[in-house]
Amino acid sequence: MSDPAVEAAKGAFANMPIMVEAAGTQPVLKALVLEVGAAAAREALRPIRELHYSVGAGTPTGEFAEKCCTCPEYWPCETARLVYAAEELP
Ligand SMILES: [Zn+2]
């Protein structure tokens, strides 16, 4: 499952050659850097997640569906797909 925060941490790490070299002999350092990077990315995504979350809504046919609280789209909206981990979305 994809997690945008984890992917951001991996991308940032890969773009730091000095860190990649140092972590080559220190796997604990790499794990720690990736964990901190993912946590930082989650903090950066938090305000966006607070603007895009699922709420219940009726459909034109009278059925129940999930809708984004901000966007005029059913859940998950396009923004949600960028800021939520895959396992958090239906
Ligand atoms: Zn939305």
Image (tube, helix red, strand yellow):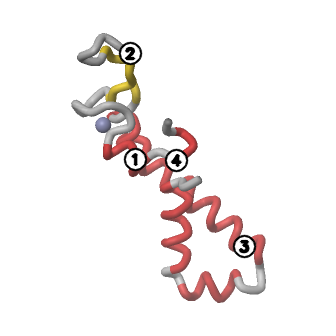
For ligand 1, tell me if the residue under mark 2 lies within 8 Å.
no
Residue that mark 3 sits on: 29
Q: Which of the numbered marks, if any, corresponds to residue 30?
A: none
Q: Position of residue 48 (x, y in %)?
A: 35, 42
Residue that mark 4 sits on: 85
> Mark 2 or mark 3, which is nearer the start of the sequence?
3
Residue at x 33%, y 17% (from the top left corner):
57
Callout 1, which amino acid? Arg
Q: In the depicted view, which residue is nearer to us: 73 or 14? A: 73
**Which of the 4 quarters of the picture holds residue 72?**
top left
Residue at x 52%, y 63% (from the top left corner):
7
Q: In the depicted view, which residue is nearer to us: 52 or 75? A: 75
User: How many labels, in total?
Assistant: 4
Callout 4, which amino acid? Ala
In the rendered structure, are the residues bearing label 2 and label 1 in contact, judged by CB atoms less than 8 Å apart?
no
Q: CA distance from mark 3 to mark 2?
A: 47 Å
Residue 87, placed above or below residue 11:
above
Q: CA distance from mark 2 to mark 4?
A: 24 Å
Residue that mark 2 sits on: 64
Q: CA distance from mark 4 to mark 3?
A: 24 Å
Residue 62, placed above or below residue 38:
above
> Mark 3 or mark 4, which is nearer the start of the sequence?
3
Callout 3, which amino acid? Leu
In the rendered structure, are the residues bearing label 1 and label 4 in contact, judged by CB atoms less than 8 Å apart?
no
Within 10 Å of the Cα at label 3, are there few (<14), some (14-19), or many (20+) other Cα atoms? some
